[in-house]
Image (tube, rainbow, N blue to C red):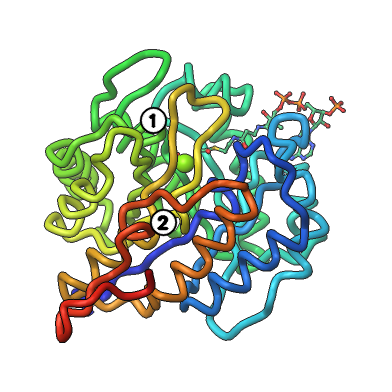
Amino acid sequence: MADRVRIYEVGPRDGLQNESTAISLETKLGFVERLVAAGLREIEATSFVSPKAIPQLADADALLPLLPAAPGVIYPVLVPNERGMARAEAAGAKALAVFTAATDAFTQRNIGMTVDESLAAFEPVLQRAADLGWWRRGYVSTAFGCPYTGAVDPHRAVGVATRLLELGVDEVCFGDTIGVGVPAQVGAVTEAATGAGIELRQIAYHFHDTRGTALANVVAGLEAGVRTFDSSTGGTGGCPYAPGAAGNLATEDLVYLLDASGYEHGVDLERVLDAARFITAALGRPLSTKVGQAGGWDASTGEPIGR
Ligand code: HMG
Ligand code: MG
């Protein structure tokens, strides 16, 4: 199974959370339906956070119960505290992600807590989720650099990841929140993580493509043995508390790279492009990702596909 890659789609959550255009419930549903049709199986759907912090996802309670139930598909949701957990539970969630960071400065601005305080807040949330049998992820944002304090030592990020695993998460996801990371850092974070006893199958990477390094970072992750990567169909995304954070790595760019490199992942590029065009049209923008513009490439004919 070494050649199988998990693509964890964050378009409906990270992709939309920072958009100023109002996006209707119908549009969000139409987006998720297309992502499911494309073969995506882990789709981070929304966040049960303060509607004042993230107004765009204030409809989480209404959205989650409407999402299409499809075999093997899970819809993790972001949960920052017990209040969010109660809402997620009432809405029928079955998988969650808690989110902290490598640096206090970012965590304080993002969720109003230090890293230590956030871990204390997550403890009852993760306990409850474990009791309910939910899948659980823990994010470590600013693992490659912080917009408020600069460079981050990989061991610092890994220390937070270890504490999340001790709290029972199934997987830790290291976030390059502001897209400053380069491949050598991915190697260093992976090495620090495995050196600390974290298994490769417990590691995911979440690259923002702010400076065009996201795909190169994926290759570094693959070479280091990591097999789970986040991406956002249409390349949307950014966090309002991370100045300068531009879009996530685009799912279509990731799928092209994985297909052409011989990895299995179960996601259909043409259908991803359909979902990408759908959501960027709803946002009133052209699809500007690389593969969104060029299409894929059929090696048997030399023709572009899905353009
Ligand atoms: P706070 O203001 O510090 O805390 O917010 P509070 O407990 O005093 O609550 C303030 C108000 O929010 C109160 O309402 C609470 O009831 C309410 P008021 O009395 O003012 O009317 N509240 C809630 N409402 C709904 N759901 C809840 C909830 N909790 C409190 N769960 C808080 C603390 C964590 C709530 C806030 O800071 C927050 O919601 N932050 C979310 C920030 C966020 O979602 N950021 C983006 C996601 S992280 C990211 O994008 C990075 C990632 O992609 C990885 C990467 O790129 O690195 C994951
Ligand atoms: Mg992000």
Q: Label 2 crowding class (10 Å Cα cut-off): few <14, some 14-19, many 20+?
A: many
Q: Which amino acid is tagged 2?
A: Glu
The three-letter amino acid code for the residue at tag 1 is Ile
Quadrant of image for the C terminus: bottom left
Q: Which residue sits at x=24%, y=32%?
A: 154
Q: Which mark is residue 7?
A: none
**Residue placed most toward the observer, 6 or 240:** 240
**Going from the N terminus, do you reach mark 1 or mark 2 first?**
2
Mark 1 — residue? 178
The answer to which of 228 and 290 lies nearer the viewer is 290
Find the distance from the CA under tag 1 to the CA under tag 2: 21 Å
Tag 1 secondary structure = loop
Q: Residue at x 30, y 38 (%)?
A: 158
- Closer to the camera, 154 or 252? 252
- Which quarter of the picture shows residue 67? bottom right
Q: Position of residue 82 (x, y in %)?
A: 73, 43
Residue depicted at 77% across the width and 44% down the height? 58
Given this view, does label 1 or label 2 mark the residue nearer the observer? 1
Q: Secondary structure at mark 2?
A: strand
Whether residue 213 is situated above or below residue 131 in the rendered picture: above
Identify the disc placed on residue 171: 2
Direction from residue 166 to residue 157 in the image, left or right: left
Q: In the rendered view, does 128 fall on the left or right side of 277?
A: right
Measuring from the top left, give residue 6's x and y in whole percent.
Answer: 36, 68
Which is nearer the eye, 189 or 8?
Answer: 8
